Image: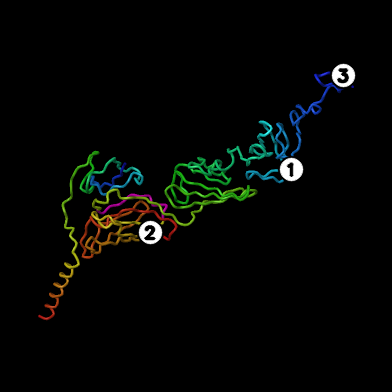
Amino acid sequence: MKYALNLADDGRILSATYAEFAPVGSVMVNELPEGNVADYRYVNGLYVHDPLPVEDDHILSDAERIAEMEEALAMLLNGVTE
Amino acid sequence: MNLKSIKFPGIVGTYTLPQTASDLDAAPDGYGLGTTTPEDITSDTQLDATIRGGFYRYAIADSTICGISFSLGSLAVYPIGTNGAVQELRPFRTTHCLRRYYLTGTWSEWVNTDTTNFAPNGFGLGLNTPPAVTTTEELDATRKCGFYRYAISNSVICGISFNSASMIVYSNTANSCVQELIPYKTNCCLRRNYVGGSTNKWSDWELVGGVQKLLWENASLTSDFSAQTIALDLSGYDAVYIEAVRSTSSNVVSGRTMVSVGGLSGYLMGTTDQLTMIRREVKATTTGVVVSAYQSANSSTGTSNEIPYRIYGIKGVSK
């Protein structure tokens, strides 16, 4: 099976689609790298494993959000009463 | 008159010479051989009784056999023995050959042995690969009822690009028919009609109903999806319909949205695995779909949730 890569300017793989959907001029490959393709750059026909630095992708849970809001509310009430 | 007394073993008599074919009940002249107008067969009873070898003229008015309507035909009978024969009937002004056989008092059903211009094998009926139409001239000339394979590469009709299509022709009269195309891998239908006679022209193609065509599919749903533009030719579409899966670790379709091509942005709305609401902004232009990173309800951003899965082109809706 063939794939078409959507690459950033530095060769970072942004996404991959199947050959039948490849736009004209796409970079075509026979195989995708294993795992997260966004961890690779495609340079000179080779995959270079180059994971991006892990960003804080943490999403607060409902309990955490409620705790945050309660804390903010407490601070607000303190400001009003003091 | 040339009278001669001739003798055969056991037979003595006076005969007229020369004998004619009909005198002898033999060809030429007998049973149609050597004549332009052989004996007429004018009734079904007479037809059923005709089992002696020879050539006849079928003249039973308003006949319909194997779907072929005719009133005149050429009939040949091939005898096998006193209890067997084959009749071959060729309706006048057609290429059809109708055949049946006789066996000890019973005739078989008629069959049409000419399949070159007659269903089921003619006109695509019952075939996996029906006759191909490969040029626009051939397409314009295809006006007989049947199933065909449209095979004109790089076609663009009503904004739909395709190389092949299933094609049906509905004929009304010799001067009136309809062509329908269903381009490969689409669910759309293109239709036009022909009016012959003094008009003698095809109408413009029209898109029947809407169209939805899969234009893109993510080949790695377990990978992060950062902000990017997915290059697509959307010039022939009014809108795109986008599906997304929840996350790189949970590939269930969760977010769906439809945005106009060249119109305002829309959002793929979904939730994280912890059910926190998130959204990705998406925008469609004639050259592709712009997808942002996702943003959660608390304004954090990321790339591992609400992963675009499929993009469909939509035609036939308001922009």
Q: How crowded is mark 3: few (under 14 residues within 10 Å), some or many (20 or more)?
A: few
Are tags 1 and 2 found on a single chain?
Answer: yes
Task: Give the SS element for disc 1.
Answer: loop
Residue type (three-letter) at the residue carrying disc 2: Ser
Per the model, the C-alpha gap separating discs 1 and 2 is 71 Å
| For the residues bearing labels 1 and 2, Cβ distance under 8 angstroms | no
User: What secondary structure predominates along the stretch shown in magenta?
Assistant: loop
Q: How many labels does the image show?
A: 3
The magenta stretch is B226-237
Q: In this view, does B39 lie to the left or right of B66?
A: right
Q: In this view, does B124 lie to the left or right of A48?
A: right
**Mark 2 lies on residue:** B260
Q: Measuring from the top left, give residue A26's x and y in whole percent.
A: 32, 43
Residue at screen point 88% across, 20% down: B3
Quarter of the image that includes the N terminus of chain B: top right
**Mark 1 lies on residue:** B43
Q: Measuring from the top left, give residue B304's x and y in whole percent.
A: 23, 55
Q: Measuring from the top left, give residue B8's x and y in whole percent.
A: 81, 19
